[in-house]
Image: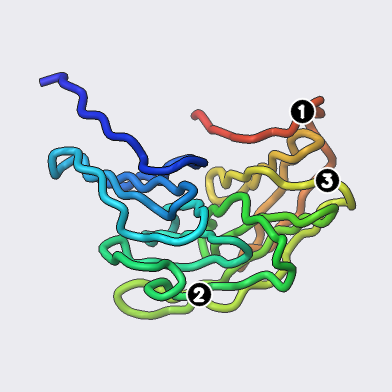
Amino acid sequence: SGSVVAATVPSAASTRPAVTGGLVWVGHGGGVSRWDTAGGGSLTTPLTGAAARVWWVKSRLVVSQGASLYEVAPTLSGVISSVGTLIVTHPDPAWVWTDVAETADAILATGYAGSESTVYAVSLVDATPLPTLGGPRQVAKLPPGEQVMCMGAYLGAYVVLGTTSGVRVGVIGQDGAVEYGPVTVPTSTPVLDLTFAD
């Protein structure tokens, strides 16, 4: 009927939402909140813990918390580190996961700590009903001092990296391999988000 139902995330530091169907997840300073638009718009906090970020890729919810990435069932509730399946914990505890995107046969994850920034690929292993996630491996490393702030995959063939220096465009190969080029669009401030059209 055109009416709008609103809710407030219960803590600070909200991050970009992940959306699928009638569900919206938002990472924030106290964990992850789920907004069910089909269920009257109620806001719940099914996953708790330290500040989190969320992505919906390959029909699964991926949550970062500190230096760790988890796969979490969308219906679970509790502490992320207890109910989630650990994908990887970066050896540097200061590591920040900045984005997750999907390719035809892998999931890409970007992050940084200090002057180091890297793109990882997580392979998919055939299983029923959904493929499971294999171990991560480094597929690209940025020049020292340049950090990946966001990423997007386009048409299954290209990856676009938003960095502290601007925008880089790369080609996605088999099993999540990435070859990126020089800074295509230099910027004076970090690129924090990307979108695609057509």
Q: Secondary structure at mark 2?
A: strand
Q: Relative to 167, is 63 on the left or the right?
A: left
Q: Is residue 78 at least partly visible in the picture?
A: yes
Query: Does residue 22 appear in the picture of this structure?
Result: no
Quadrant housing residue 179: bottom right
Type of the residue with mark 3: Glu
Task: Tell me if mark 3 has few (under 14), some (14-19) or many (20+) residues whose alpha carbon lies within 10 angstroms of its own.
Answer: some
Q: Which residue has dot 3 on it?
A: 146
**Amino acid type of the residue tagged 2 in the rendering:** Leu
Residue 92: image location, x then y, percent: 74, 68
Q: Residue furthest top?
A: 2
Residue at mark 3 to residue at mark 1: CA–CA distance: 12 Å
Residue extending farthest right: 144
Residue 79 image position (x, y, % from top left): 39, 68
Which residue is rendered at x = 31% and y = 53% of the image?
Answer: 45
Neighbourhood count class around disc 1 (C-alpha, 10 Å): few under 14, some 14–19, many 20 upward: few
| On-image quarter of the N terminus | top left
- Residue at image coords 81%, 36%: 165
Q: In the image, what residue occupies the spot 68% across and 70% down?
A: 90
Pick whichever, 39 or 122, lies toward us.
39
Secondary structure found at label 1? loop
- Where residue 14 appears, as percent x and y from the top left, is 47, 40
The earlier-in-sequence mark between 2 and 3 is 2
Amino acid tagged 1: Thr
Q: Which mark is residue 86?
A: 2
> Does the residue at mark 1 contact the one at mark 2 (Cβ under 8 Å)?
no
Q: Position of residue 16 (x, y in %)?
A: 48, 40
Q: Earlier in the sequence, mark 3 or mark 1?
A: 3
For this view, does 120 lie left or right of residue 153? right
Position of residue 49 in the picture relative to residue 165 (left or right) = left
The residue singled out by tag 1 in the image is 189
